[in-house]
Amino acid sequence: MDLIQSFSVDHTRIVPGIFLSRKDNIGDNTVTTYDIRLKRPNREPVIDVAAMHSLEHIIATYLRNDPDWKDEVIYWGPMGCLTGFYLILKGNRSPREIYDLVLRAFRSVSDAQEVPGAAPVNCGNYLMHNLGMAKWYAAEFADYLAANADSAAIFEYPRTERLVTDDGQHFFDS
């Protein structure tokens, strides 16, 4: 069975950043999935669940209201491992081309006075939010992005290397 693309990323070497996860052609359209990674997997604590939920609501609302990008946004949501988010956009842009959008989105969290859609009628777990911690994580990530804007490491995945035998079998180190 083939390893899916996201599992071919070397999670022992990835740093926070904005990465191209995959591109899919659907008819005449291209859809691009980005990995917005806030934490180093398996090396630092993951994002608090309630803060992650609040970041999901706040940034989804920001992205879907940005006048230049709202028609391009398909999806914004958390990774199951709680180290980041997936952003799916129409089109085919490099991670560097969406850097300003992502930075603005995370900077906008500091202005939030409440979590949008955090009511029983709008949210499946409306009590599980933490705006204060969401602001802290957002500021930490935005400051990191700004400080590392010139580093290729925040835009290019470290890939795992897999030896493929002559008969097509994949070899995995232990």
Image: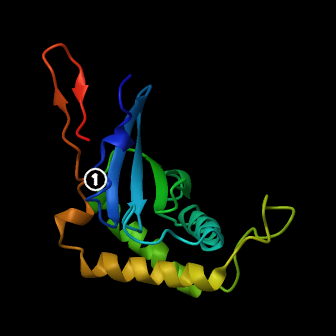
Q: Position of residue 97 (x, y in %)?
A: 29, 60
- Give whichever of 167, 131 is nearer the camera: 167
Quarter of image, res 114: bottom right
In which quadrant is the N terminus drawn? top left
Q: Position of residue 139 (x, y in %)?
A: 45, 83
SS at circle 1: loop
**Crowding at mark 1 (Cα within 10 Å: few <14, some 14-19, many 20+):** some
Residue at point 18%, 70% (across, down): 151
Residue 115 visible in rendering: yes
Q: Is residue 95 left or right of residue 77?
A: left
Q: Is residue 25 above or below residue 42?
A: above
Q: Is residue 8 above or below residue 44?
A: above
- Give whichever of 163, 33 is nearer the camera: 163
Q: How is the image coloured?
A: rainbow
Q: Position of residue 136 (x, y in %)?
A: 52, 84
Q: Is residue 13 above or below residue 167?
A: below
Q: Which residue is mark 1?
A: 94
Q: Which residue appears farthest toward the front when viewing the image?
A: 174
Residue at point 23%, 44% (across, down): 160
Q: Amino acid at mark 1?
A: Ser
Quarter of image, res 60: bottom right
In which quadrant is the C terminus drawn? top left
- Give whichever of 166, 26 is nearer the camera: 166
Residue at point 48%, 78% (across, down): 138
Q: Position of residue 4 (x, y in %)?
A: 38, 34
Q: Is residue 1 above or below residue 160?
A: above
Q: Which residue appears farthest toward the top when viewing the image?
A: 167
Q: Which residue appears farthest toward the right when viewing the image?
A: 121
- Give whichever of 16, 58 is nearer the camera: 16
Q: Is residue 154 left or right of residue 134?
A: left
Q: Is residue 5 left or right of residue 68?
A: left
Q: Which residue appears farthest toward the left when viewing the image?
A: 166
